């Protein structure tokens, strides 16, 4: 069973999510949906019996809701299906086929986004996710590890407390009966946290490196946030210098992370290994992204776009776009290679 | 633990970061309403770009603001005890959510918000923010619910914990409980409304909000109000009332249990390097 590096999966996820947001063309959306389901089926480890979202039910609800909502609210387009009295608030007016189609496509775009994230959830093991935490947030990474490790233990503790209370004749009937279960769970958990903290200190946690921001880096954070705030407002008012400010703000916040990560450099007991398959996955994902997003910004804005307004027509299907979307299928294809 | 030199500048900078982060959050959430307010007719020309740029930019803003607050607050709360307590409290809360997933409650009710509110209330705003953000992150990872909505959830729940740390500690138990009940109810509604604003640009799209010339901001707000009433008001009311019920049943004993641990959590040995 081939597994991929978590960093390769993140690039795959970002590419898929960006494409799902950028396109409203139903052909491309359906291709993306199919790809994400195939990759999930091929790459999800069979022993992962994680609780999963009921995908198709959720997708059905989203599609139904967004179609109905837009059909009733947006009175645009030329193919009128029926007309409601104009004096009805918001829904009054002509209800069109185009509005329903637009609502359906918006919903489909959301469903594809959901499918891509679900695939990511299914194929990346939890302990690998903590590797994505930057060095500056090292302590949050430890909190994450502690929490993930203690969830099964807390579930067992919950069962034990329930059984112990049941022996004393306790039964869960009303909401009030949760008190004798939740409070002992909380106290025993905190008691265990104290033990854990002492164990950590005994093994030298926090004795050498302390993550602490100096006021100089904090000033940089303030400057970055300020640039971000002003920049986002400038962008809203359609000023191009807003983008420059956003970029500078992101750079200064990135610098804070970089400084802080360098000060708190740590070594890993089990370093991640990078294989040739990871390189191929990442190259194909980036290739797809550059090809499609690049063509949207450089060649033609409407390559990925499709709007049913003002009259519903069959959307265009470009073969090269469909083919380049297949770059995201790489993780599933490489599984076949021994 | 070495006691760091405390200059007068640091609290001021921290408050500035809080304020800036809150403002960035508000801007990100209000983005869908901005374009109709500013240029009601422009969207028809370039509806494609604004349809895709709006949600992307909003997610970017929320992520950056979250990154700023996390690195700032984590840097202040060093120490093995905080890390361990935070981790275990997040695990307990996530387990409660798991039990909740198995037994679905009414509407948007979820038991994870009450622990966030109470630990923020007892351990202070810093702990509250980290608790809120990390609880949502971990429960998303455990229930395989990582999605584009996650930064919004972390940001909003973090602020829920942060603001509960600012609540005054009243001496009368009944008044204290009343205040917390009100707080839980308000945040139950607010959380729902904020999470709605996240999905709003996807489902409705700017075309809907701006196509009719002249409607502008009031039109956009009217449509959001319909969207909210149609989809989420009942759901959010269930969340808000659920928070109140849980606080009523578990609030006071939980505060008592957390208080007992607060002194132990903050107890630290101070070394003097040159003694």
Image (cartoon, helix red, strand yellow):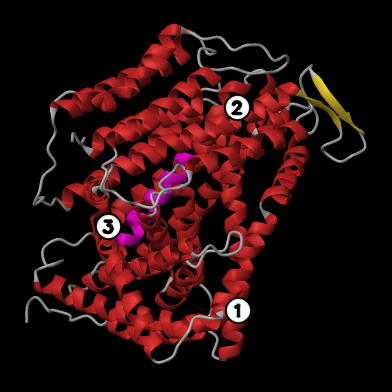
A91 falls in the magenta region? no
The x, y position of residue A87, in whole percent, is: 93, 37
Helix, strand or loop status at disc 3: loop
In the displayed structure, would residue B71 be above or below residue A298? below
Which residue in the protein does label 1 denote? Answer: B179
Residues packed near mark 3 inside 10 Å, few (<14), some (14 to 19) or many (20 plus) = many
Q: Are marks 1 and 3 on the same chain?
A: no
Marks 3 and 2: in contact by CB < 8 Å?
Answer: no
Question: For this view, does A333 lie left or right of residue B199?
Answer: left
Q: Do the residues labelled 2 and 1 touch (CB within 8 Å)?
A: no
> For residue A105, which numbered disc appears in the image?
2
Callout 2 secondary element: helix
Real-space CA distance between mark 2 and mark 3, rounded to the nearest whole angstrom = 46 Å
Q: Quadrant of residue A83?
A: top right
Q: Classify residue A208 by image quadrant.
A: bottom left
- For the question of whether residue B22 can be seen, the reply is yes
Marker disc for residue A213: 3
Q: What secondary structure is found at the residue carrying circle 1?
A: helix
Q: Position of residue A57 (x, y in %)?
A: 54, 43
Residue at point 35%, 43% (across, down): A121
């Amino acid at each position: 069973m081939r597994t991929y590096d978590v960093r390769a999966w993140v690039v795959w996820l970002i590419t898929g999510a960006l494409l799902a947001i950028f396109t409203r063309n139903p052909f491309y959306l359906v291709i993306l949906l199919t790809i994400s389901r195939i990759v999930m089926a091929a790459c999800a480890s069979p022993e992962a019996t994680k609780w999963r979202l009921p995908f198709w039910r959720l997708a059905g609800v989203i599609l139904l809701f967004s179609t109905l909502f837009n059909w009733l609210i947006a009175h645009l387009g030329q193919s009128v299906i029926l007309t409601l009295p104009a004096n009805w608030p918001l829904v009054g007016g002509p209800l069109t086929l185009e509005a329903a189609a637009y609502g359906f496509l918006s919903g489909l775009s959301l469903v594809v986004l959901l499918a891509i994230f679900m695939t990511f959830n299914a194929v990346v093991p939890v302990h690998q996710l903590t590797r994505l935490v930057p060095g500056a947030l090292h302590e949050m990474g430890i909190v994450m590890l502690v929490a993930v490790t203690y969830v099964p233990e807390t579930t067992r503790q919950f069962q034990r407390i329930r059984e112990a209370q049941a022996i004393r004749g306790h039964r869960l009937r009303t909401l009030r009966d949760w008190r004798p279960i939740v409070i002992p769970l909380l106290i025993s958990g905190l008691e265990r946290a104290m033990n854990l903290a002492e164990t950590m200190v005994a093994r030298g946690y926090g004795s050498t490196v302390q993550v602490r921001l100096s006021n100089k880096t904090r000033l940089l954070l303030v400057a970055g946030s300020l640039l971000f705030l002003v920049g986002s407002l400038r962008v809203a008012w359609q000023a191009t210098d807003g983008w420059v400010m956003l970029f500078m703000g992101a750079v200064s916040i990135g610098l804070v992370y970089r400084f802080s990560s360098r000060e708190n450099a740590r070594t890993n007991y089990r370093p991640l290994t990078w294989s040739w398959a990871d390189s191929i996955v990442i190259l194909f994902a980036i290739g797809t992204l550059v090809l499609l997003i690049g063509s949207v910004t450089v060649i033609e804005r409407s390559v990925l776009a499709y709007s049913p307004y003002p009259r519903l027509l069959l959307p265009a299907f470009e073969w090269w776009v469909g083919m380049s979307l297949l770059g995201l299928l790489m993780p599933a294809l490489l599984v076949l290679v021994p | 633990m070495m006691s760091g030199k405390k200059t007068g500048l640091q609290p001021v900078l921290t408050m500035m970061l809080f304020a800036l982060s809150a403002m960035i959050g508000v801007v990100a959430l209000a983005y869908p309403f901005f374009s109709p307010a500013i240029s009601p007719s422009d969207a028809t020309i370039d509806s494609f770009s604004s349809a895709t740029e709006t949600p992307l930019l909003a997610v970017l803003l929320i992520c950056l603001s979250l990154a700023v607050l996390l690195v700032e607050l984590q840097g202040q709360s060093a120490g093995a005890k905080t890390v361990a307590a935070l981790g275990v409290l997040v695990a307990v809360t996530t387990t409660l959510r798991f039990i909740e997933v198995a037994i679905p409650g009414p509407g948007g009710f979820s038991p994870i918000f009450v622990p966030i509110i109470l630990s923020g209330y007892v351990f202070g705003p810093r702990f509250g923010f980290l608790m809120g953000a990390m609880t949502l992150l971990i429960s998303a990872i455990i229930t395989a619910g990582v999605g584009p909505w996650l930064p919004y959830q972390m940001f909003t729940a973090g602020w829920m914990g942060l603001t509960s740390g600012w609540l005054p500690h009243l001496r009368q138990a009944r008044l204290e409980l009343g205040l917390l009940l009100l707080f839980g109810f308000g945040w139950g509604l607010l959380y729902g409304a904020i999470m709605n604003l996240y999905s709003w640009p996807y489902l409705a799209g700017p075309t809907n909000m701006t196509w009719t010339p002249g409607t502008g901001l009031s039109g956009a707000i009217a449509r959001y109000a319909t969207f909210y009433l149609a989809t989420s008001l009942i759901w959010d009311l269930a969340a808000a009332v659920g928070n109140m019920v849980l606080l009523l049943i578990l609030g006071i004993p939980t505060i008592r249990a957390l208080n007992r641990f607060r002194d132990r959590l903050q107890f630290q040995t101070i070394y003097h390097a040159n003694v």
